[in-house]
Structures are given as C-alpha cells and as structure tokens.
Image: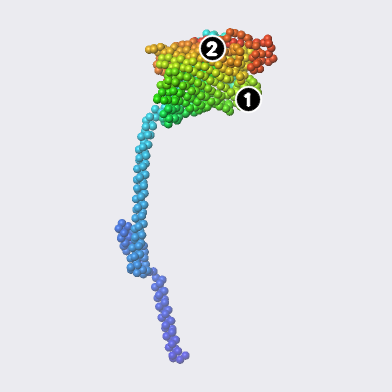
Amino acid sequence: MNYRSKIALFYAIALIIAGLALSGRAFAQAASPQPALKLYVDPATGQVFTRPGRGRAFLTEVPASALSESDLEKRIEQKTQAQLQQNQQQLLDLERKNDTLASDNQKLQQEVAEIQPAWRSYIENFQDKFRVGTLVYGDYRLYTHTGFGPQEQENLNAPGPGNNLYNSFDISRAYLNFFFFPTDDFTVRVTPDLYTARGTATADKIGSSSAIASNLDGQMGVRIKYAYLQFNKAFNWSPNLQGDTITAGVLSNPFVSWEEDLFGYRFVTDVPWNFAGFSSAQLGGSVQGPIKFNELQYIDYDFGVYSNANYHQYEQTNTKQGMVRVSVYPFGAKWRFDGLGATFFYDYGYGNVAPDSATGTTLLNAKTGHITRGAALLHYTAENWGLAAEFDFGHNAFTGANLFSSSGPADYFGTATTSFKGFSSMTTAFLENGKADERGIDFFGHYHIPRTPFTLFGLFQWFQPNTNVNTDPLDFQRWVAGVSYQYNEYLRFAIDSQNLSYYHNQFNVPESYVNSFAPVFTAPTAGKFVIDAVPRDTHAFFINMEFNY
C-alpha cells in the first residue's frame, strides 16, 4: 500500500468514527425524557396557572417542545374553555334538578293540604258513618183452644188439638241492625236474626256402641235476615227519580215488608200472604223508589229477581223468581203512605227443589212446577187512621208445610201415627197436586185515638187454599183485634185476640174424591171417607211487646 492509499484509508476511518459518535449522541437525546409543562386551573375564575396552588385543580400536562408558544396558549385556552363549559352544564343540570324538586315538593304539599281536611273529616265523622239498632218482639200468649194451622208470627209454635190453655212467654224475634254509610252514595246493612231452633232431638252416634243426645230442639241459633249493599244515587240524574235505589244481597222482597209497614202491626201478627207462607226476604237484586212530580209522589215501585229459596233456606233450583210491586197515588202523596193509593203485586217463581227431583208423579208437580202469587189493594192512610182492602190470588203457593207451620199432624212430617192419618193424606192431595189455585180477601186497618197513646187495630183474612176443591175443608178465616199502647218512641205494647176458624161445618170427604187430585189412598172404595175433615179452630189471647231502636 502506497502513502496516498494509507492517507485515504485514515480519513475514511476517521469519518466513520465521527459519524458513529454523532448518531449515538442523537440516540441518547431521543431516549431521554422531554421536559413537560403542567397546567392548573382555578374553577371559580377560570384562570390557568403553571404552578399548583390553593383552590387550583390539575388541568393537563403538555410537553414543552411539542408545540410552539402560540399553539400551546391556544391549546390551553381550548382545554380551559371545554372544562368551563362542562362545569357550567353541570351547574345548569343541578339548577334544573333543584327547580324540579322544589316544584314537586310544592305539589306534594298542596296535595297533602287537600287530603288532610278530607282525612280529618272522615276520622272526625267516623261515628256518623255507623248506626247500630235493635228490634225485639216479645209476647205472652194463652190458647183457649188449640188446633192445626199457620204461625201467628215467625218462630211461634203451639201444640195441636187437645192442648187447651197452653201458654208461654216468647221472644219471637231479636235483631241487631248494623248500618254502614261509607259515602253518601252507598248503604250497607247486616242484620243477624236470633231464633229458636226447632227439630227432633235425636241421638248422635259416637263410635260403635255409644251416643249422645242432640241439643238442636229449643236451642238459640243465628242466621242472616238482611245483608245487602244499596246504591242510593243511581237515578239522581233525573229530578223525578231522585231517591230511588238499587239493592243487592239478602233483602226484603217488594211486597211483604211494604205491607207490614202499611199495616204497622208486624209485632202482633203476620200480614195475609206472609201468614200463608210467603217469606219477607230473599237473596237477589232489586230496583225501588218513588216517582215524583212537583215534590209529590205519584208512583212507588219495587221490582227484582230473587232465588226461589227464602233467607233461611238453602237454594236448590236452577231457576229464579221475579217480583214486581207498583203503588199509585192518583192525588199525590207527601210520603210513602199518604192518602188514597192502589197497589198491585205479582210474583212468578218455582218450588225450591233440585232439578233432579222432577218426576212424572202428579203429587210432586207442586214442588217442581211454577208458583204464582198476586195481590191487588186499595188503601187510604190519614194522620190518625188507615184502612186497606186486599184481593189475593195464587197458584201452587200454599202447601201443607205452610198450613202446618205452627203445628200439624205428626204423620204429615214423617212420624208414623194413626191419628189424623187420613186428614194428612187429604191435605197433601188437595194442596200439593200441582193444580191448586188460591184466592183470598183481606181487610186491615188502625185508628189512633187523638191525644192518647192508644190505637185500635184489626185484621180479617178469608183464604181458600184450593178453589178447585168443591167444598174444601181447609178453607179458613182469620181475625185479629186489639189495642196498642205507645210508651215512647221506641217501646209499645198490645193486647189482642187472635183467631183461626175453618169456616165449613164438619163433614167427611170420600177417599175417591181425594184421589181425583192425587193418588194418596190405595184402592179407595165408595164407602171410605176421611172422617171429620175440617180441622179444629184456634183461639188465643196475646200480650205483645215491641222494642225498636
């Protein structure tokens, strides 16, 4: 290698070394951390600082060499502005939430202010929403003559013929009336009925060789007489129907209770159709009330649909019965019974037996066939007196069970006996053959002696259980007469005579004639008769008491 070649190689090596030195310095500079600028902001004023301080919050960190001074200031300003806008938006959202809460709080306070008086009024007047009352009927009765026949009042029973001078003290009815008025629109009534249980006191077997006596006969029982909901303002949209109501539950039927109020002496005796076995209360629904013009009542109506059972029976049928009563006051009435009125009532239903009881036997048709009851009345009520005349008609509406509701032949109720056996069979044939038609005429009224607590009252009933019988030995007349004493507005007493007379003279009825209604006698002959077919009369004296609060 010559001298020039050595010089050239030296310079090449020197240049390579110098280049390596420069690239290493650059690499060291790139690997070392760059200085950064930390920025802080005061949220209250929006000022930006490069050093931390009281009330300042860290904003961001920017490398010092990344931007020029103008870009850095611009970035800082943009960042600060965004943070301020975000803070302002949060403040606005918070203000809106506060406004909403304040508005809701004001509404709540207003609602509470509106509710509080109503709530206080409901609590303070709570006692006015209830009414509790009681109704008690009591009596002392003495029978100078005893016989078979219906009850004078519900739950009163007397022994049959041969028990003259039978007498007793009785509580025939004891009600507790509960009324609840949750609002002016509705009335709820619940009336339990305390009564004396009747029935054969048979033994109740326990185990295979022992028994105990039943306590059914004579024990006190409780059943529901009334339990209904009444809508009081159903027709307030009409000025002529204001006060009319819709009622559902166990309630009075349209006629019996109305007639009891017309007569005014339910605590003494039953009104005619009730005496003939028509109960005063059923389970169903009805619409009732007056129709008024110029504040005078011209029509009073009540119609509804009910079960075929009454309030103390179990419903067995798959049918129902309908009833309607319309009372017309041609000259207008100031209250329910005022002046001259005419009333019509009609009931169509069926016997309370299960559907599978229907058979082809003629004797059972009365229980499975239809039943009708009707009445037409003309009545006048004044301040001190009242008088009513009534015509009754019916079909299959009076059975042996109705005739013997007070007492009857043991044979009729399934107890074997030789006494009255023919009479019991005759009664079944005449009254339960499915073709019995009833007729009746009644009069009742009262006269209050002015300026005294005494009122005279009376009732007369003439009833034919089956007009299809040529001479029916079961035709009867009933008359009640007495005087009542009003002790105060809650308590009154009455002394009265009550009498049931079968008005035909005693005679015998051929068994063959009885069998023409129903085959109750086996192989009757012309020489066989029901001996002494007319039942014995019943005469009694009563002292009655009513407490109604």
Give the class, few, some or many, for how many residues have Cα within 10 Å of label 2's Cα (few <14, many ≥20): some
Q: Which residue is mark 2?
A: 477
**Closest to the observer: 121 or 186?**
186
Q: Which residue is mark 1?
A: 358
The one nearer the camera, 255 or 275, is: 255
Question: What residue sits 41% from the left and 21% below the top?
Answer: 334
Q: Which label sits in the foreground, 1 or 2?
A: 2
* Residue 480 visible somewhere in the drawing: yes
Quadrant assignment for the C terminus: top left
At x 48%, y 17%, the residue is: 378
- Residue 469, percent across and down? 61, 14
Q: Are marks 1 and 2 in contact (CB under 8 Å)?
A: no
| Frontmost residue, 80 versus 469 | 469
Identity, as a three-letter code, of the amino acid under mark 2: Gln
Q: Is residue 458 above or below residue 318?
A: above
**Going 49% across and 14% down the picture, which residue do you hit?**
443
- Residue visible at 34% across and 50% down in the picture: 95
Mark 1 vs mark 2, CA separation in Å: 34 Å
459 relative to 104 in the view: left or right: right
Q: Nearer the viewer, residue 52 or 235?
A: 235
Residue 24: image location, x then y, percent: 41, 76
Residue 335 screen position, x and y as percent: 42, 21
Give residue 112's quadrant in the image. Answer: top left
- Which mark, residue 212? none
Amino acid carrying mark 1 in the image: Ala
Secondary structure, mark 2, is strand
The quadrant in which residue 490 appears is top left
Instruction: From this view, report whether residue 424 is shown above or below residue 57.
Output: above
Q: How is the image coloured?
A: rainbow
x, y percentage for residue 86? 36, 57
Residue at the farthest front position: 330
